[in-house]
Image (cartoon, rainbow, N blue to C red):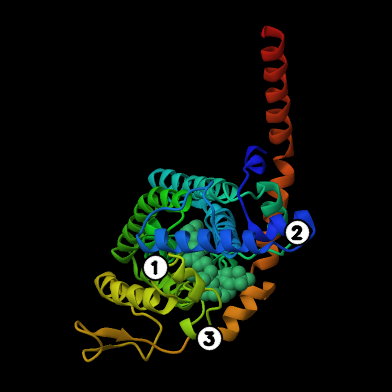
């Protein structure tokens, strides 16, 4: 793949390739590069693909961007289940467009990860073998049509809250991909809320379906933001490097504060008896909320959620079913190359 040819200077990899440690002069050169890198990040400048970067920065980005890409394409599955069961032509067209957008987001993100010198095939292998993580949220089942609205409202809502600050991430290719992704996700969130508003104007059964879906998705949506700041292994470095701009807990709080009034307008209750407005927190006050069940989070992240096995099996099946498309594309490219050679 073309990105494997990208030659990004990296002290650790260069050492490993040479089979020995760096000389004093090389270490001094790297320290100077690192100081310049830190200064650029502090000035708010973008780091681009061929710029020097600390190996830890590169690895953190590959980890986060690839997990994010996997989340988008695994995230197509819970909603994809409902395309054939959408209640109207309009809802079906909206859902088809949304699921296609998610596939597109995965592609932008894999491409952004490739600019860091990794091969997409290796990232996909890591997903299929169960080594790579993807967002916990996509291991929950979609049981009724209201789940589709709740995914748009809460899951895309949480995703946007987390991803808007990534539009200012220090790594240029990731930041630029996020701008487009966030624009599309804002449409996703609004279509979800609109779907729920419609159902809430319907029958008592429809309103009960919405409440049931909200009850099941609320806590998993709060888990999307990751562990509490004190337990977040990567936040320190990621904030220092300008990858993360706002911490897991602060984003979670912003999400709760934004969502509670929307729930009221919708006419549903959120499944948390401890949810109450605390006027004394901060200048404008905040919504206090109950304790997150981190054992459920760990269980899901470690592969034992309700749908982990099904989701991975579906991804692997889709990859195998698509083998002929990849083979045809390669054969076509080879034919073009042969034609170009003959014409030259
Ligand atoms: N699920 O030290 P931290 C979407 C892992 S896209 C699973 O705090 P970090 C669109 C974390 O990876 C949703 N694992 O980590 C859509 C790390 O494990 P590692 C995805 C999680 O990276 C909508 C460990 O815990 N969004 O929804 C989760 O600094 C609707 C320690 O955590 C993104 O990926 C989790 N929820 O902060 C599609 C946004 N949380 O790698 C379809 C970009 C944490 O050491 C339908 N990512 N972990 O093995 C981020 O902003 C960050 O990576 C965080 C985690 C905030 C997710």
**In the picture, residue 186 is in which quadrant?**
bottom left
| Residue at the spot of label 3 | 293
In the displayed structure, 246 sits above or below 229; it is above
Residue 245's disc number: 1
Residue sitting at 35 percent across and 60 percent down?
43
Residue 144 visible in this rendered orientation of the protein: no
Along the line of sight, the residue nearer the viewer: 152 or 30: 30
Answer with mark 1 or mark 2, whichever residue precedes in sequence: 2
Asked whether the residues under the numbered discs 1 and 2 touch, taking CB atoms below 8 Å apart as contact, a structural biologist would say: no
Assign a secondary structure to mark 1: loop
10 Å neighbourhood of mark 3: few (<14), some, or many (≥20)? few
Please tell me which of labels 3 and 1 falls first in the chain. 1
**Please, what secondary structure does the residue beneath circle 2 have?**
helix
Residue 148, quarter of picture? bottom left
Among numbered discs 2 and 3, the one appearing first in the sequence: 2
Q: Nearer the viewer, residue 184 or 61?
A: 61
Give x and y (percent) for residue 30. 57, 60
Image coords of residue 124 (percent x, y): 68, 52
Residue depicted at x 68% and y 72%: 303
CA distance for labels 2 and 3? 42 Å
Q: In this view, does 132 lie to the left or right of 19?
A: left
Identify the residue position indicated by label 2 in the image: 16
* Mark toward the viewer: 3 or 1: 1
Q: How far apart are marks 3 and 1 (CA)?
A: 25 Å
Answer whether labels 2 and 3 touch (C-beta < 8 Å): no
Q: In which quarter of the image is the N terminus?
A: top right
**CA separation in Å, label 1 and label 2:** 32 Å
Mark nearest the camera among 1 and 2 is 2
Q: What residue do we see at 47% from left, 59% from top?
A: 37
Within 10 Å of disc 1 (Cα), the crowding (few <14, some 14-19, many 20+) is many
Tell which tag, 2 or 3, sits nearer the viewer: 2
């Amino acid at each position: 793949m073309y990105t494997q040819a990208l030659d990004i200077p990296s002290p650790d990899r260069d050492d490993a390739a040479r089979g020995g440690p760096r000389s004093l002069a090389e270490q001094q050169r790297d320290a100077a590069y690192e100081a310049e890198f830190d200064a650029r990040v502090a000035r708010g400048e973008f780091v681009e693909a061929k710029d020097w970067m600390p190996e830890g920065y590169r690895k953190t980005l590959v980890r986060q961007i690839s997990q994010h890409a996997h989340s988008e394409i695994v995230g197509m599955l819970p909603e994809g289940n409902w395309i054939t069961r959408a209640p109207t032509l309009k809802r079906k067209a909206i859902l088809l467009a949304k699921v296609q957008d998610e596939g597109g987001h995965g592609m932008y993100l894999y491409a952004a990860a490739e600019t860091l010198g990794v091969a997409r095939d290796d990232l996909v292998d890591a997903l299929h073998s169960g080594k790579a993580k993807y967002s916990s949220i996509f291991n929950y089942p979609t049981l009724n049509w209201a789940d589709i609205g709740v995914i748009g409202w809460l899951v895309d809502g949480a995703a946007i809250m987390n991803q808007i600050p990534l539009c200012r991430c220090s790594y240029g290719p990731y930041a630029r991909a996020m701008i487009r992704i966030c624009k599309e996700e804002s449409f996703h969130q609004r279509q979800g809320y609109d779907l729920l508003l419609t159902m809430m104007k319907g029958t008592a059964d429809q309103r009960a379906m919405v409440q049931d879906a909200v009850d099941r998705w609320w806590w998993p949506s709060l888990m999307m933001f990751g562990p509490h700041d004190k337990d977040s292994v990567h936040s320190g470095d990621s904030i220092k490097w300008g990858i993360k701009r706002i911490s897991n807990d602060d984003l979670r709080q912003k999400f709760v504060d934004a969502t509670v009034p929307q729930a009221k307008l919708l006419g549903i209750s959120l499944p948390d008896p401890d949810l109450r407005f605390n006027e004394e927190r901060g200048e404008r006050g905040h919504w206090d909320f109950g304790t997150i069940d981190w054992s459920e989070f760990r269980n899901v992240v470690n592969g034992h959620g309700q749908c982990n096995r099904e989701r991975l099996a579906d991804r692997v099946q889709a990859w195998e079913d698509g083998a002929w498309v990849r083979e045809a594309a390669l054969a076509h490219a080879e034919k073009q190359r042969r034609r170009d050679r003959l014409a030259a």
